Amino acid sequence: MQTASLLLDRLRAAGLSDVTAVEPVEGGMAALAGLATRRNGPPLFVKSFVDVPADGLFAAEAEGLDALRERGAPATPQVVLATRDVLVLSVLRARPAQEAFWEQLAHALARLHTSTVHDRFGWERDNWLGRYRQENAWTADGYEFFARRRLLRWLPERRVRAALDQRDRRALEHLCERLPDLLPPRPACLTHGDLWAHNVLATEDGRPALIDPAISYTWAEVDLAHLWCSPHPPEAKRFFDVYAELTGLDEGWRARMPLLQLRQHLAVIAQFDHDWGAAQQVRAILKPFRR
């Protein structure tokens, strides 16, 4: 079934009978998405999967959007409807190619990270990163949480087993044992969880807005690492300087980014046949930890 037809059927099954057409939009890596035109209201953004991975996936994403907005993060789209089969949101704009925009984002993200400090790592329930479950069981130790719930949890996945050999897996386990030596102690705070430039948009009045969260309370630098290590436009350079200043980052933060980005590389390997070089990146990061 074509994307437009599938999304239109899902919307009508969810009770949005005034939708007249859906225009597919490109850019999503896991889900299908489109803009829905209505007879009696503004257009809507709609998201679904051909085969939805789990009953609570869209409810968890809606919860994440609401939690970020309520706790003072950058704006998020309003949730219109979240059912088992479809997520419907208000429409956002493309972000402007301006340094000032990214500076606003730095202030908003720093405010989120510094105002939501928590005594445990995790979230009230599991949610999803793309098509795969993100494990969020509460843990008091940030090193244990990152090792078990964000790194080692990917090793059983089929594509990860195929991409990494036994030496790679042992090296990852060794790295996890060394985390207290490699990363300074940091408290947990509320994080977006999938923060790369593709998930940064703008509100109608031009303020930064975020989509596609996989929220949890974990280290703030997990969000920073994904933005730093994934493609971002040249005007985003100012973001990192402002964020570092606002949050008091030490001079060694850049050296930590590849290690923290391991989680995202492993997730990409697990979900896609073409991993955009993620396995190569993982092996390079793990090289010093091979015994």
Image (spheres, rainbow, N blue to C red):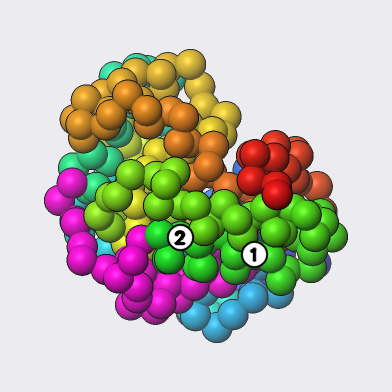
Q: Amino acid at mark 2?
A: Phe
Left or right: where 122 falls relative to 11:
left
Q: Amino acid at mark 1?
A: Trp
Quarter of the view holding residue 60 = bottom left
Is residue 118 inside the magenta stretch? yes
Q: Indicate the secondary structure of the residue bearing disc 2.
A: helix
Tell me the magenta residue range: 114-142
At a point 46% along the width and 52% down the height, the residue shown is: 179
Pointer 1: what residue? 154
How far, Cα to Cα, is label 1 from label 2? Answer: 12 Å
Front residue (pair 280, 21): 280
Quarter of the view holding residue 278 = top right
Q: Is residue 114 visible?
A: yes
Front residue (pair 181, 202): 181
Q: Are marks 1 and 2 in contact (CB under 8 Å)?
A: no
Left or right: where 267 falls relative to 182:
right
Pointer 2: what residue? 146
Q: Position of residue 271 (x, y in %)?
A: 71, 59
Is residue 129 inside the magenta stretch? yes
Q: Position of residue 163 (x, y in %)?
A: 81, 54
Q: Is residue 282 visible?
A: no
Q: Position of residue 180 (x, y in %)?
A: 40, 52
Front residue (pair 215, 47): 215
Label 1 crowding class (10 Å Cα cut-off): few <14, some 14-19, many 20+?
A: many
At a point 57% along the width and 29% down the height, the residue shown is: 231
